[in-house]
């Protein structure tokens, strides 16, 4: 149901658990929170189960509705046409680490997500967390990352995780200075082409509900909105008092 997140706990200085839940059993949640001394539980639950949020309210469990995450799905059926405006795609290697670190920090330093909507969590640790997440994924057997170049300059990246016949694009972006040049679209087309050639049948990608611009790009590439999740941060009584004092 919920598991201890060492990386997030170390990063933000709270005892953090997390989990994806289709249903919430209030008694079970309370038991885990108390038994494990959980200070913040980061929980994702399907938007169709909005009544779960209502149950939390009725039971006086303190939580933050931190974001609404939308998932889009594509089932690739044909190799897309690559655009060619001086754009290159280069597989990530260990020697690219500093370049990727720069790209992540530059692209996501001001990006708003569920962490940034919780005043308890120091926003300066969000971008380093993204970098750690990406590099861990891309070094694993199921991960792959590509760097995007424009006129020989590194302009963006796209990172994916592969399971069975599914590719999930976990994080991607382009530097603001290189926006509106087709780089982001070309990166997505490269992934679609890779999945087509390697017989992956489903591609998933997600973003916050208010990130409208990228959703338009996905729709133009025939991605379809498929499902969504609420991200909630359940707070212990002590932590909820601290959170209230920061408002």
Image (cartoon, rainbow, N blue to C red):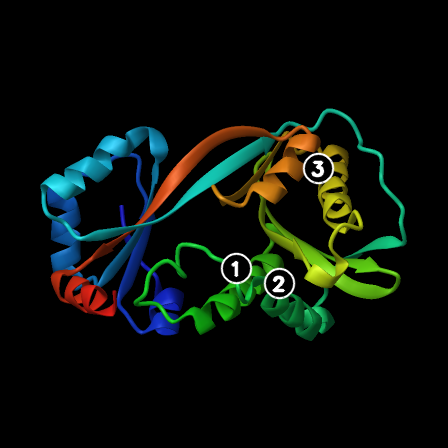
Query: Looking at the image, which residue is at 61% across and 65% down?
Result: 104
Query: Looking at the image, which residue is at 12% across and 50% down?
Result: 30
What is the C-alpha distance between the residues marked 3 and 1? 28 Å
What residue is pinned by disc 1? 111
Q: Nearer the viewer, residue 203 or 207?
A: 207
Tag 2 and tag 1, C-beta contact below 8 Å: yes
Is residue 150 visible in this depiction of the protein? yes
Please tell me which of labels 3 and 2 falls first in the chain.
2
| For residue 35, side relative to residue 187 (left or right) | left
| Rendering coords of residue 216 (x, y %) | 63, 36
Q: Residue furthest front?
A: 247
Mark 1 closeness class: few <14, some 14–19, many ≥20 residues within 10 Å: few
What residue is pinned by disc 3? 195
Tag 3 and tag 2, C-beta contact below 8 Å: no
Q: Nearer the viewer, residue 66 or 9?
A: 66
| Placement of 222 over or under 66, stated as above or below | above
Secondary structure at badge 1 equals loop
| For residue 224, side relative to residue 114 (left or right) | right
What residue is pinned by disc 2? 107
Query: Looking at the image, which residue is at 25% across and 65% down?
Result: 247
Query: Looking at the image, which residue is at 77% across and 38% down?
Result: 193
Name the image quarter holding the N terminus: top left
Secondary structure at badge 2 equals helix
- Number of numbered discs visible in the structure rendering: 3
Q: Which quadrant of the figure has residue 27?
A: top left
């Amino acid at each position: 149901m919920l598991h201890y997140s060492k990386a997030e706990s170390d990063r933000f200085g709270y005892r953090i658990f997390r989990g994806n839940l289709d249903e919430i059993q209030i008694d079970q949640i309370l038991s885990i929170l108390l038994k494990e001394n959980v200070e913040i539980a980061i929980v994702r639950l399907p938007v169709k189960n909005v009544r779960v949020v209502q149950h939390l309210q009725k039971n006086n469990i303190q939580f933050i509705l931190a974001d609404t995450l939308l998932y889009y799905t594509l089932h690739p059926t044909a190799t897309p046409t690559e655009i060619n405006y001086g754009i290159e795609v280069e597989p990530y290697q260990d020697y690219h680490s500093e370049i990727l670190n720069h790209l992540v920090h530059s692209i996501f330093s001001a990006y708003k997500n569920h962490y940034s909507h919780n005043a308890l969590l120091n926003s300066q640790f969000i971008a380093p967390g993204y970098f750690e997440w990406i590099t861990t994924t891309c070094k694993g057997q199921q991960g792959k990352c590509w760097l995007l170049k424009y006129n020989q300059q590194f302009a963006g990246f796209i990172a994916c995780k592969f399971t069975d016949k599914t590719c999930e694009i976990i994080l991607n972006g382009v530097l603001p200075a290189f926006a509106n040049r087709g780089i982001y679209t070309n990166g997505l087309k490269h992934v679609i082409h890779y999945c087509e050639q390697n017989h992956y049948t489903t591609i998933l990608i997600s973003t916050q509900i208010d990130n409208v611009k990228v959703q338009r790009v996905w729709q133009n590439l025939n991605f379809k909105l498929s499902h969504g999740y609420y991200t909630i941060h359940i707070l212990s009584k002590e932590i909820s008092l601290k959170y209230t004092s920061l408002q």
